[in-house]
Amino acid sequence: MSTVGFIGLGQMGSPMAANLIKGGHSLRVFDISETAVEKMVELGATAATSPADAALDVEFVITMLPNGALVKNALFGENGVTETLDKQALLIDMSTVHPFETDALIKEMSDKGFSMMEAPVGRTSDHAIKGELLILAGGTLQQITTAQPLFDCMGSETVDAGGPGKGIRVKIINNYMSIALNALSAEAATLSEAIGLNFDAALKVMSGTPAGKGHFTTTWPGKVLAGDLSPAFMLDLAHKDLGIALDLANQVNVPMPCGAASRELYSIARAAGRGRQDWTAVFEQLRVTSGLEAKVK
Ligand code: NAD
């Protein structure tokens, strides 16, 4: 069993720390909220008075803070972790921060002779309570292997994202997609209601199509990802149907910002001569427009 300094005992950090204690690890905990610290002490943790105090004589320090500036301050600020951290210990930042901040923190830690990895988490505080988080590990294989017993207390699945800085990148991409999809879903549901559809019936239809299932596992594998842009569903037709939906929305006063922005991408693809290609060609078009090398000749 290990000794762990845990900094940031909020909605996520508290249950994660509690699960580490349940797993038999010894915790030194710090939070600016005394109440949060007291709750963890009741579960068996030792209270620390600063990040430096939390990092005293421990094998691991975990940070679970709201943003990158706070993580940086906890590491390098006054009474920060690096004032006391053992050079053999492993710092694991599990917060969601900007990937470039993670890169800079890993570099600064490494320049000072410390070992750091990131392991942001997927899922929600309910999963944190049950110890069922998705751990997106960004680090060397050795760092991930060393941290695995801790991850196993807090999560039900650990993904090796492919090296330092990759865990936070996959976390941000995953959040980008699910957050944007949430807004697109709200548009579709609102339009359904505004044009008099029974939402349960509409939901049933959309749950069985790429609308509800997503494209990565339905339309893309056999087409754009396989290098085949011959049309299963022609891009011109997708553009037409999107236009009908936007017109309908316009007539019933439902704003559809995600759909309207999407139509621009279809228009760009049509202007580039892709109208008669498969609709999944929007991916190839966006790649090329973004300066990436064309994949499908
Ligand atoms: P939270 O606001 O509930 O908790 C943050 C904790 O950090 C609070 O207890 C606060 O007192 C403490 N804190 C703030 N400044 C501090 C400092 N300088 N020193 C010590 N403690 C300090 O946030 P949360 O929901 O627990 O989220 C933590 C991180 O996890 C965030 O980066 C968030 O984006 C990420 N995350 C959250 C969820 C979620 O569902 N809530 C899911 C995945 C990832």
Image: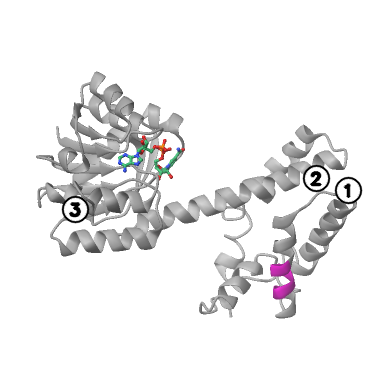
Q: Name the amino acid, label 2.
A: Leu
Report ligand 1 position as a quadrant.
top left
Residue beneath label 3, please? 142
Q: Name the residue rendered at 39%, 35% in the picture.
A: 12
Rendered image quadrant of residue 66: top left
Alpha carbon distance from label 1 to label 3: 58 Å
Vertical arrangement, residue 15 with respect to residue 182, above or below: above
Q: Which residue is mark 2?
A: 191
The answer to if 277 sits in the magenta stretch is no
Amino acid type assigned to the residue bearing label 3 in the image: Gln
How much space separates mark 3 and mark 2, taking CA atoms?
A: 51 Å
Closer to viewer: mark 3 or mark 2:
2
The residue labelled by disc 1 is 252
Measuring from the top left, give residue 144's x and y in whole percent: 24, 49
Q: Which numbered mark, 1 or 2, is in the foreground of this view? A: 1
Q: Quadrant of the C terminus?
A: bottom right
Q: Circle 2 sits in a helix, a strand or a loop, which is it? A: helix
- Which of 247/12 is in front? 12
Point out the stretch of residues depicted in magenta.
Answer: 264-269
- Is residue 14 visible in the rendered image? The answer is yes
x 70%, y 44%: residue: 186
Describe the element under mark 1 as helix, strand or loop: loop
The residues bearing labels 1 and 2 have C-alpha atoms spaced at a distance of 8 Å
- Residue 157 on image: x %, y %: 36, 40
Vertical order, 1 against 114 (above or below): above
